[in-house]
Amino acid sequence: MFISDCLGLSDAGHLTIGGADTLMLAEKYGTPLYVMDEDNIRENCRLYKKSIDKYYDGRGLVTYASKAFCCKEICRVAADEGLGLDVVSAGELYTARQADFPMEKIFFHGNNKTIEELSMALSYGVGRIVVDNLTELEILNTLARSLNRKANVFFRIKPGIDAHTHDFVRTGQIDSKFGLALETGEALAAVKEAISFENICLKGIHCHIGSQIFDIEPFEHAAQVMLGFIAQVKTETGYEIEELNLGGGFGIKYITEHDPVEYDRYMQRVAVTVDDTCKELGIRRPFIVIEPGRSIAGPAGITLYTVGAVKEIPHVRTYVSIDGGMTDNPRYALYHSEYECLVASRAGEPREKTVTIAGKCCESGDLIGEGMRIQEVKPGDVVAVLATGAYNYSMSSNYNRIPKPAIVFVKGGKDRLVVKRETLEDVIRNDL
């Protein structure tokens, strides 16, 4: 009935998440409100971990891509489930450390890490630093030398794969701000330089071909390309790269029509490709790392809003104005991302109205969606936008000086606050 397994209906016909009544949550914590089903998050973590353990004989690691949704509590959950963590900034790394996440299981990504961020990663003892370019490699070697230590690194590689997704979230092709190109010889030159540096230990290579991908074939192709590069490095230098990070990008169901690949099916097929390719190339199978983010957090989350005005423009459209918008979910403004929405008090009834859900910002593009199907809706109703667990809170802003919403986790039907709602004092906290 719903796009996510964590959603249901109460006896009163109200939308529930993780067994908790969303109307009760809205009344208790206010709106806008992010709500996450912790049990669903943990189940997704376990599905990935079980699958990688099964198909790679325990020689693999699932790292949660925290850019999808980052706070101290999700770091604690990931650690508790035995996952690694992918961070892309000092802020995400600091959050992980404050949550006591094991530093040796962190992969630090980013196309333009500052000297301060690299120093922070070295001082914290981060497990792997994913180097994006030769400038970063040289800086890192100098920093590591000054600290009398070796930095364990990966290189981010552009495998040249078309992931059949939105141009803004395609990252594996040659024309990308991320990584080193294979076609130009740039990647091989970087490897040769890395293995010559005394304070660099090249552990592996990494690729990420895009986001919200529904096909398995691009992942298989990326694995073949990356393994081919490992074989080339071995042939030309004698150095055998031990680890391979195949990234993330697994699609989720945002709307009914979406048909994402089951995690286990993806893992099985890519593992077969990895094994066959390694045998063909005469190389050992590397330790395999994957980086799911959206597919762990996205389906587990919803956002609750309170409806203000309902404005009908005859023969044009109906605007449903909510008390949030692009400040807590900028994805429609950025990508025209699709969502489904429900009136929380009538979630089981047919969605017979077509509306545009509009945010409260002074911006004509502040929309959650256009042409959205919803139940009969009126001012004061609580509206739930589904599958907002990823890239909503993490991309939120204070545009128009609007405070950011609170985040509530639900576990076993019981709710708890994990991120407080910002106050107006929080908004001006750094003003002088």
Image (cartoon, rainbow, N blue to C red):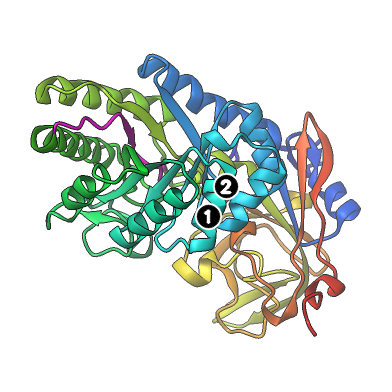
Q: Is residue 307 above or below residue 23?
A: below
Question: In the rendered image, which quarter is residue 57 located in?
Answer: top left
175 or 2: which is nearer to us? 175
Circle 1 sits in a helix, a strand or a loop, which is it?
helix
- Asked if marks 2 and 1 touch (Cβ < 8 Å), the reply is yes
Q: Is residue 280 above or below residue 107?
A: above
Q: Is residue 197 above or below residue 352?
A: above
In reply to whether residue 241 is colored magenta, the answer given is yes
Residue 123: which numbered mark, if any?
2
Mark 1 belongs to which amino acid? Ser
Q: Main secondary structure of the magenta part?
A: loop
Q: Residue at x 24, y 41 (%)?
A: 222
The image position of residue 430, as x and y in percent, is 77, 76
Q: Is residue 426 above or below residue 409?
A: below
The image position of residue 354, as x and y in percent, is 58, 66
Mark 1 highlights which residue?
Answer: 119
Quarter that holds the N terminus: top right
Quarter that holds the C terminus: bottom right
Circle 2 sits in a helix, a strand or a loop, which is it?
helix
* Segment tinted magenta in the rendering: 238-250
In space, the residues marked 2 and 1 are separated at their CA atoms by 6 Å
